[in-house]
Amino acid sequence: MGIRNVVLLSHQGAGKTSLAESMLFSAGAIQRLGSVEEGTTTSDYDPIEIERHIGINLSLLPFEWKETRVNLIDTPGYADFTSEVKSGLRVTEGAVIVVCAASGVEIGTEQMWAAVERLGLPCLLFVNKMDRDNTDFYNTLGQIQKKLGKKCLPAQLPIGAQSDLRGVVDLITMKSYFGFPVEEKEIPSELEEKAASFREKLIEAAVEIDDALISKYLEGETISDEEIFGAVKQATLSGKLVPVFAGSALRGIGTQSLLDAIHHYLLSPEETTIIATNSTGEKEVVRPSIDSPLTSLVFKTTADPYVGKLSYFRVYSGVISSNSQVWNANKRGMEHIGQLFTLLGKNQQPVSQLGAGDMGAVARLNLTTICDTLCAPEHSVVLAGIDFPKANFSMAVYPRTKTDLDKMSTVLSRISEEDPSLQMRRDPDTNEFIISGIGDNQLDIIKEKMRRKFGVDVRLDLPRVPYKETITIATKAEYKHKKQSGGHGQYGHVFLELTPLPKGGGFEFAEKIFGGAIPQNYIPAVEKGVNETKQEGILAGYPVTDLKVTLYDGSFHSVDSSDIAFKIAASQALKKGLSQGQSVLLEPIMNLVIIVPEACTGDVISDLNTKRGRVLGMSPAADYSEGGEESSGRMVIKAQAPCAELLRYTIDLRALTQGRGDFVMEFDHYEEVPSHISQKVIAAQKEHQKSA
């Protein structure tokens, strides 16, 4: 039995999940059609997906069609869940992009198209929701050809439109297919001429792949349906043709024709070339056969408080068996494989083994995480991983209760294993726990997952900006700590010199004590007092930086001096010096590399100006992209702006560019905060300290 591994892609709301449901029903994998609105589809089984009517996880949906096993991967359409799309693209040999006939080509459609083109995957297009009001297949086709390319040509035409949609015409067999279940008939007379015209265009594009067929076509000889099928397949696999299909997933119209196209036109795993890196660092070809040594890639994990971690994998060569040992080439350790499963949405079907080209899952792997290669111990190779998107949107996580605090970091670590685009860290300056992802919806879903799956309740706030403080003029400060209260007293006396350092100079402590003014054994206590006090400046309690503190003199008492006395004296002297040194507030300045459509450049620059940003330069995106790949109509803007103005920049840029913009942000340096803003920051921080 052959295999087809296919990823289903679209903009949010185009009907991918309904189409997947229709495919499963047509193939007999499910006995009843589920509904997105009712929360009964096979793909969207997570309670959050059911409640919100959106996909947030990829779903593995295997079924059989015409003696071919199809592993269909349904992916989320929302931009915040791009990681799931990347995983689906990594382990498939073909793609179906769904376009909503009512909405046309949307930003998500273009982004999915770009991803498929970048990987060189053979692709089919399905124009869905043809039964909706105000839809016109030919208008949508025009949009597709304008935005995605002229190589997108119909392989089918719809019969009827909107509420009168009845079936489709196949342009190769020149037959009509009505209803659900499908009934084959002749082409309606009113469509014969149009069908003949579009068939001619399809054949013209397809035969270009074969010189013999071109000659035959130009000489007016008849080309058989089998030859056309073969030519369309070769043209599709080479990327010179993208067949377009039409129908309605909800009514099952066009679904079986699309399944036939997946069977006929997309690659089987045996037809692909797989490159891996062996233990010596050299590239080698992995033969996609069950007779080869095992090579498989883990492309997704899910965390479940009851089942444990579930790892989804794709077998590229050889066979993986239940209750066996495999080698994790990334972690360099043996991994025990328990019971293997195939998955149909959330439903698990135990299997004894899975062979080359197939996909499945296994629970409770100890070493293995996403992107790891599991292989035969005697043939250790590493497959290329998955290029996950960069996390650009951050929120601070606060537990609701002490119990939530105790469990929070453990639960977040488990959830981050599911999605490597998530990053977590503790900010050393603000002491906040920061979680970063692709967008606000993704982080909101993470919060909801923590509550539903693990019983941990948290709130998310925008992170506090890690401001710092420094002095602007050199100064000297003295402090004598003297206390007498019966018995031993306390005595410590220090002279400190405070000198501003250049930007990025950090903090330095030095001593130049002469003549034993302070014994050497007390100097560490002075340094400790200085280091503890520099964590809270005098303006708003932010850490002090770009400062050198030198201990140059002092005095001691042979009986009353102690470490604690010198520590207190140093602390008070530093505070005094900071107040004398005209302290100012510093803010982090970020470097931005923003890639946007040329038409949006003006809006983005205007927005940067309102954010106290500085544009450092602009260039065409092709100059910036790796290898100078073509990125027509896109510009790269390099800029700097304060961190405080960029906390919601992911959301702002999406709004400015209708989701077409992207950016990378990283810390560059600290700069003095303008005085009018500084006053507001200091006032807000003092209010925060009162309420804390």
Image (cartoon, rainbow, N blue to C red):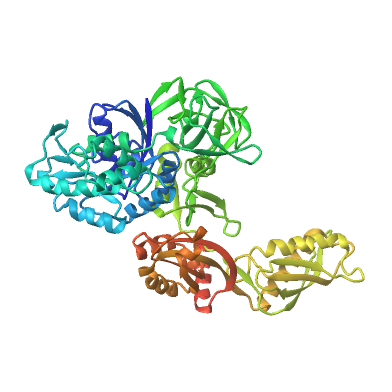
472 sits to left or right of 17:
right
Number of callouts:
0
In the image, 32 versus 425, the foreground residue is 32
Residue 353 in the image: state x and y as whole percent.
Answer: 46, 22
In the image, 300 versus 458, the foreground residue is 300
Outermost residue, right side: 515
619 sits to left or right of 497:
left
Q: Residue at x 13, y 50 (%)?
A: 133
Outermost residue, left side: 189
Quadrant housing residue 170: top left
Quadrant housing residue 603: bottom left
Q: In the rendered image, which quarter contains the N terminus?
A: top left
In the image, 688 versus 250, the foreground residue is 250
In the image, 683 versus 550, the foreground residue is 550
142 sits to left or right of 330:
left
Residue 15 in view in this figure: no
Is residue 469 placed above or below 368 in the rendered structure?
A: below
Quadrant housing residue 158: top left
Residue 411 in the image: state x and y as whole percent.
Answer: 50, 40
Q: Residue at x 37, y 28 (%)?
A: 2
Residue 298 in the image: state x and y as whole percent.
Answer: 50, 36
Is residue 657 placed above or below 186 in the rendered structure?
A: below
Is residue 364 placed above or below 509 in the rendered structure?
A: above
Residue 48 in view in this figure: yes
Q: Residue at x 46, y 19 (%)?
A: 352
246 sits to left or right of 96:
left
Residue 349 in the image: state x and y as whole percent.
Answer: 39, 23
